[in-house]
Image: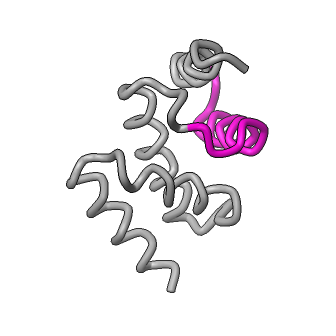
């Protein structure tokens, strides 16, 4: 999938207003599973949204095996604030 198509797929998901949060989270997990760790193909805005959503999902201790590879790769590209939230969430898994 070309870089623009990845970014468009994530943008479409985040823009969907007719989805419940749980449905949206499940679609995000399916998209992450299907694309593999492809954060380099996402724009900065979508990276921030992905990280925020993944932190929320991970805090519920769901889909850990899908989320951890993404967050590990994204840890190098996120803000200090998001990195702090991510580390706090990951420590909660212990």
User: Residue 39: x percent and y percent?
Assistant: 53, 38
Task: Give yes or no for residue 67 being in the magenta stretch.
Answer: no
Q: Which residues are magenta?
A: 16-38
24 up-or-down from 69: above or below: above
Residue pictured at 44% horizontal, 46% vertical: 51
Image x and y of residue 6, in percent: 62, 22
Residue at the farthest bottom position: 94
Seen from this angle, which residue lies furthest left?
80
Residue 77 appears at what percent x and percent y?
A: 35, 45
Instruction: List x then y, in percent, for residue 16.
Output: 58, 17
| Left or right, 31 with reference to 44 | right
Quadrant of the image occupied by residue 1:
top right
Relative to residue 47, is residue 31 drawn left or right? right
Please name whichever residue, 19 or 78, is drawn nearer the observer in this view of the structure: 78
In-front residue for pair 5/25: 5
Q: Is residue 94 above or below residue 35?
A: below
Residue 28 is drawn in which quadrant? top right
Q: Judge whether residue 33 is colored magenta.
A: yes
Res. 17 visible in picture: no
The residue depicted at 55 percent of the width and 64 percent of the height is: 60
Which residue does the image show at 62% across and 32% down from the upper left? 20
Position above or below: 68 against 30: below
Which of the pair 83/27 is nearer the observer? 83
Image color mode: one colour
Q: Main secondary structure of the magenta part?
A: helix
Residue 60 visible in the current orientation: yes
Q: How many marks?
A: 0
Q: Is residue 36 above or below residue 3?
A: below
Q: Is residue 45 left or right of residue 90?
A: left
């Amino acid at each position: 999938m070309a870089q623009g198509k990845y970014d468009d797929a994530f943008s479409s998901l985040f823009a969907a207003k007719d989805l419940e949060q749980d449905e949206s989270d499940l679609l995000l997990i399916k998209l992450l599973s299907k694309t593999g760790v492809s954060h380099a193909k996402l724009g900065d805005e979508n990276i921030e949204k992905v990280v925020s959503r993944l932190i929320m999902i991970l805090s519920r201790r769901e889909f850990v095996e899908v989320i951890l590879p993404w967050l590990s790769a994204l840890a190098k590209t996120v803000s200090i604030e998001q990195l702090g939230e991510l580390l706090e969430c990951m420590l909660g898994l212990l």
